[in-house]
Image (cartoon, rainbow, N blue to C red):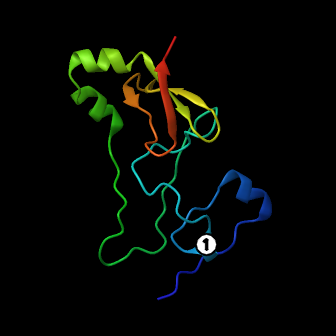
Amino acid sequence: RACRRAPLPRRRRALFPLLSNREEHGVMRVGPQWHADGSFERRGFSHVLFHAQAVPRVGGGTEMSHLAAAFDALPAAQREAWSRLATVNAYSGAVHPLVHLHPRTGRRTLFVHLRQTGAVARWP
């Protein structure tokens, strides 16, 4: 069955980039490995919307992880060490702390893109 969607107005495309596993719908092959969205931007995304327009009967390969819970599950020494590190995006040079503080909940959460991390450095 074909997947249909109304095209976004031109000005909205800059605000809402479309990613797809079908070339006619958007950008292909983005993030085939574990990652946090927006690591290539100097200022990370405030929101990410995931909307599946067509879902395969089997497979699909998309998984979501609670990265605050993952951080909480680390041993205390590792949480402390990782809280002093930053990742450098290999493509844009954007630098982000490996551990972010959520602005609303105050929880610490991991923020990393496995494929696009070019370096890990000490965070001041």
Q: Is residue 41 above or below residue 107?
A: below
Name the spot of residue 97 as percent of width and height, x first.
49, 24
Q: How many marks?
A: 1
Foreground residue among 92 and 72? 92
Image quarter for residue 81? top left
Q: Is residue 66 left or right of residue 91?
A: left
Image quarter for residue 78? top left
Foreground residue among 119 and 60? 119
Residue depicted at x 57% and y 62%: 19
Residue sitting farthest toward the right: 11
Foreground residue among 32 and 65? 32
Q: Residues within 10 Å of mark 1 (few under 14, many from 20)?
A: some
Residue depicted at x 44% and y 27%: 98
Residue depicted at x 37% and y 60%: 62
Q: Is residue 40 above or below residue 16?
A: above
Residue depicted at x 56% and y 36%: 89
For disc 1, the marked residue is 25
- Where disc 1 sits, the SS reads helix
Residue sitting farthest toward the top: 124
Name the spot of residue 58 as percent of width and height, x first.
29, 76
Foreground residue among 100 and 115? 115
Q: Amino acid at mark 1?
A: His
